[in-house]
Image (cartoon, grey):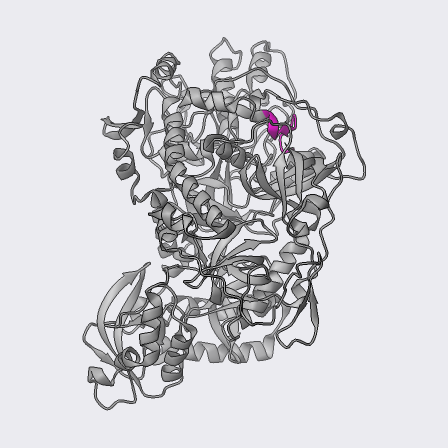
Amino acid sequence: MILNSVKKSPGSLANNLKQRVFTRMSDSESIKKMLRSVLQSSKTGVSINTLQLEYRSLCGESIPLKKLGYSKLEEYLRSIPSVVRLEYQMGELKCFATVCQETAHIAELVARQKSSKKSGHSQVINCKMRFKPSNPYMLNVRPRSSLRQPSAAGTSNWPANRSRSHGGYRGFSASGDYRQLDQRLSSITPVEHRQPASQSVVKQGAKPDRKKESLENSQRPREKPPEQALRPNQSQAILYNSSRTDIEATGSQESQQCRSHPLPSGVEVVGPVTPPCLVLPSEQYPSVLITDAKSSNAVTVRYVGENYSNAQEAMEDAMRSFYTQGSPYQHLSNPVIGQLVAVRAEDGAELARAQVMEVMAPDKVKLYYVDYGFSVETSGSILLELHQDFLCLPFQATNVRLAGLETFSSHQLVLSALDRLAVGRILLMETLEPCQETEMPVAVLYDTSQDDDINVNSTCLKALQDKTMNNPLTVNVTYQDVCVTNVCADGIIHCQLPSRGTARLSKLLEKTEAFFISQMTSESLVSRPFCGKFCLARYKGKWSRVEIANMYSNRVMEILYIDLGVPATVEVTDLREIPPLLLKDFTIIPPQAIKCRLADLKFPEGDWSPEAVLWVKEAVLGSQDCKMKIMKLDQHKGDWLVYMYLFIGAASQELDKSINYQLAQSELWQKLKTQNNTTIKSSDSSVDTGLSALVEKLTLSSLVPQPTMKPCHRAEDSPLPDTTTETGTQPLQMPPSLELPQPGQNIDVFVPVACHPGYFVLQPWQDLHKLVVLMGEMILYYNQTWKTSTTTHIQKGDVYAARIDKNWQRVQVKGILANGLVSVYELDHGKHELVRSNYIRPLIEEFRQLPFQAITAQLAGVTQHQWSEEASMLFRNHVEKRALVAHVESVQDVSDVKGELWDRRLTVYLVDTTLEDRDLWIHSILANIGSDLSSAA
């Protein structure tokens, strides 16, 4: 049915839709193959609690349960018995690869592997974190002058040889970084006094890449890169990972700064050698394990990632080898407070680093495990002298301060919320800027394991709210003096009820007005904005409480007036900090805007029409005599959703006098219901083109020409089109063409989209800052004007601004659908999207100065023309949303381009320069990948 409906559609849009359907159908089989690869690499099975983490470490993303039609992981696994076998062991549900004839040989090989030597701690933590979309351009890179020759190591058995991960505190497996150190330590004599090993022994600070596989360590180059790509070229900047190790090599000054940073133990280190500072990861949302929370100003975390967990386990492997092979470093008989020691576990099989916090008796001490972030009281007999070479790795546990909770850091309600939401869990952490080297990092924690992200900082702050200050909500009760504050496009109506909270809030806002009139200073400006921050902004000439809902950049953000239910896009300079003397009083008052819907009204799916929203606004906003009768109460994302009848100026509360009844009987509503029969529900302006349910409903319009003045139209016979404004008075020009590099050049690029090696999109790195500024300006302009402006006339081939995923993008219209949807191509990011026609606006001249930034490309050095989904996924995980270097092999000639100039295509080598010891040429990892994946399947 889906394909038949697509076949009836004319033009290239039908082909695009059909391709998406086939891609969607193949996704399920691809997921099964990758899942089988995960399970086959473990003979002891994978816990269902860690399976998502295992899958993500291989594929770079979690199993998309919602897209597959499941709400729980176990339900999905039980639906594919040909792939997964579930079995309870010791009360834990384990997942095993189902053995069939094709995979029996792999199962036999895995069974011969040695058992994992470490079982990890018994503490159960969550391992189902979903990646949080980050700003893709916030990368920590620096230029070098030339590329490095790729290695040509032997083959590997991928993915069976990839890193294994374990539950509990040991999040990931060990690497071999400490093997050389292990060999050196085994030859130490009692009289030797060695200097600490160099920091190159364990490389920390390179960007922890959640999408890398160990396949990188065994490249098989199919084609040698051009020699000219390897020669230095001072005119070209080559992106390399900006490791803070380079900065830390400056010597004693940095060491002194590290000593000034307090350890989580609270005890100063005693000894001649102090480990270097822990290097923060450069990614925006690294995974961290929360081990302790003494207060919100002292939350102990451990980074979870390849350059952290692996390095620690490698060091402990070396410690175990060193202390069990006749080491001269013996039992520590006289421990001193602050001393760093090696600790042997009771069974003698494990060793760890610790600091002496307290000597409680001759044979009893209190220790702080510096890599795990917790303290224990134990026997002094397990203490060993710690060799200096085991101090080259920074302490893995570190403290952070939670933003927005400084005033309430030790409040019992905050500590209880932290213990419930964070301690013992793996979360995502955002470190705020600016952060000095000697300053404790200020952070925001996110739990993304549920359907909706939880901002831990914001949730802890809301725990202080006094719910008794709100008017209690009761079904079948009529409330007087209701104030309707906003009507949203999805039919949500925000109301204020008279309460102790509204009365107290009104007085506080009056004090705020007086404060800013008399004491307005630069200290009142918000210097560190972050999602969930509680602050103030002006609304209709008065200060009002707001929460930052979304950060487009450090300058442009979306806020919500929490007492009005009104969203807005503002600049950071429009925000003010709450006066310190009023902060506690403001914090305990819950948001006064209540979410409501008109009861017994069959409202349309998705957004209402602008006419319907305007009708309700004119009827209820600003009304002095407004009443509401509550008919039903529902929980909606943690907040109450009230279904009500709304009455304006009516003496009685008969239902036929209500706004509900009047709207339902209006011609406007009847027309809206008719239109809704062909409208598809969407939670935002963009529509997921991958959903087959959507494709079933798509019918292409006949694309009848519309008699409109085109806001940005390309003349058929001109590469730089002349267009006219809607007034028809001035011609509008397209942006200048992007200057493309020449064959043989190296350029720094960002890859926003990668379908497969034969088709991906590049953005020039040097101009990305201009694009970020442009997008911020577009968000400010269109968010403030698009809801009040008139409907835009749309024509195929023209260029517009379109609202996509809460951003505004420069797009070209590719097709117009009969159900109000428009197919567009993002000219700066290279993505195809479906958006609603009412989310499209003319692209004004100010936003047509920067050349369109998307450049289509294909990978050089490969011979295939058809790519399997597995190979495409591997390629995407290595390049998509990554900063890379492109060595240009060829540029498509202008005469070969049938469409616009921006359709020109490059053929390039892609190089990942974030590795410390070598450059990774992407084409080399794709050599013979098909046979590797076939054997793994």
Q: Looking at this view, is 902 or 65 the one in front?
A: 902
Q: Is residue 697 above or below residue 150?
A: below
Residue 90 % position (x, y): 24, 26
**At 63% across and 65% down in the image, what residue appears?**
712
State the image quarter where residue 477 is shown: bottom left
> In what quadrant of the picture does the C terminus appear?
top left
Residue 640 % position (x, y): 29, 65
**At 32% across and 70% down in the image, what residue appears?**
674
Q: Please say whether residue 919 is one of the residues in the magenta stretch.
A: yes
Residue 325 % position (x, y): 49, 9
Spot the residue most to the bottom.
651
Q: Is residue 425 above or below residue 452?
A: above
Taking the image as shown, residue 584 lies to the left or right of residue 71, namely right
Q: Please say whether residue 29 is one of the residues in the magenta stretch.
A: no
Q: Is residue 11 above or below residue 915?
A: below
State the image quarter where residue 924 is shown: top right
Q: Looking at this view, is 607 or 307 the one in front?
A: 607
Q: Looking at this view, is 145 or 638 the one in front?
A: 145
Q: Looking at this view, is 512 or 21 the one in front?
A: 21
Residue 613 % position (x, y): 40, 75
Residue 825 showing in the rendered view: yes
**At 61% across and 42% down in the image, what residue appears?**
260
Q: Is residue 780 above or below residue 130?
A: below
Residue 555 showing in the rendered view: no
Spot the residue most to the right.
234
Tally the marks. Answer: 0
- The region drawn magenta spans 913-924
